Image (cartoon, helix red, strand yellow):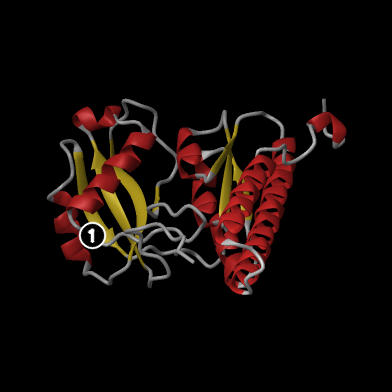
Amino acid sequence: MANAEPKNVNLRLERFEYRAVFSKTGRAKYISHLDLMRAFQRVFKRAPLPIWHTQGFNPHVYIMFPLALPLGTDSRVEIMDFALTEDIPYGEVLERMNAQTPVGLEIVSVSKPEHKHTDITSAEYVARLRREGHTVLMVGDGINDSPALSEADAGIAISDGAAIAREIADITIAADSLWELVELRQIAMALMARIHSNYRFVIGFNGALIALGVAGVLPPATSATLHNFSTLGVSLRSMSQLVPSRRTVGGPP
């Protein structure tokens, strides 16, 4: 079976955390929070620095910012946390990043992030649950939810939430009702059940055709015809509705 992991993404590698203090002045003060993340993703790619990716279903570059400043505001003490897959000296990381930052952005310092033992954030809580072997689903709509959305196995954002949360999340709910999560779960379970059912039928039916052909019971032309009809039947069944409509499953109107 083919590997389902995304290409060119470093998964399950050692993680080395860094904290960068940077300034955002001049024309750069008009860069939005979401575009700032994209700008630093390009910086890491061009530096080049081996950026670490989140371990969820849809891996993302591990970059975290505090609350966003209002657009058009200068700052010389912005903070960005990120992680690399290699332990590179802080000075070298600073030099590489500054060589690629656009005008108005400058890395002031790079150091090891220090967290107080009393600080319990949602991201740390999610990470602890995953280390304990739990599968974690995180729902959030704000900038402060972004780290936890990255850490979770599956992150879900609300459509009218912060842009950075929608960018990081694996799934975005278009409606304003969490009932969509129930429907999503029903659809996912029904889809996996149908996939397994189709797989068992294809293996069993084609295996029987091969056995009957080898035994001389069925001629090749008949086997090929039955195979084509079975393929058509599986395709038509796969096009049928997965789950009943919302009204029939007891959901909200």
Q: For residue 182, which quarter of the picture?
A: top right
Question: Would you say 181 lies left or right of 51 here?
Answer: right
Question: Would you say 100 lies left or right of 138 here?
Answer: left
Which one is in front, 183 or 145?
A: 183
Q: Is residue 119 visible?
A: no
Give percent across and percent down for residue 186.
74, 45
Residue lying at 65% horizontally and 38% vertically, measured from the top left: 239
Quick one: label 1, few (<14), some, or many (20+) residues within 10 Å?
some
Residue lying at 86% horizontally and 33% vertically, measured from the top left: 248
Which one is in front, 31 or 6?
A: 6
Task: Report the residue marked by disc 1.
Answer: 49
Residue lying at 29% horizontally and 47% vertically, measured from the top left: 41
Give percent across and percent down for residue 43.
22, 48
Which one is in front, 189 or 69?
A: 189
Q: For residue 242, which quarter of the picture?
A: top right
Measured along the vertical axis of the image, is residue 229 above or below residue 89? above
Residue lying at 67% horizontally and 45% vertically, measured from the top left: 233
Which one is in front, 241 or 12?
A: 241
Look at the image and tell me in which quarter the C terminus lies.
top right
**Is disc 1 placed on a helix, strand or loop?**
loop
Give percent across and percent down for residue 15.
38, 69
Q: How many tags in the picture?
A: 1
Give percent across and percent down for residue 79.
35, 49
Q: For residue 207, which quarter of the picture?
A: bottom right
Question: Would you say 86 lies left or right of 172 here?
Answer: left
Measured along the vertical axis of the image, is residue 69 above or below residue 150? above
The amino acid pointed to by label 1 is Leu
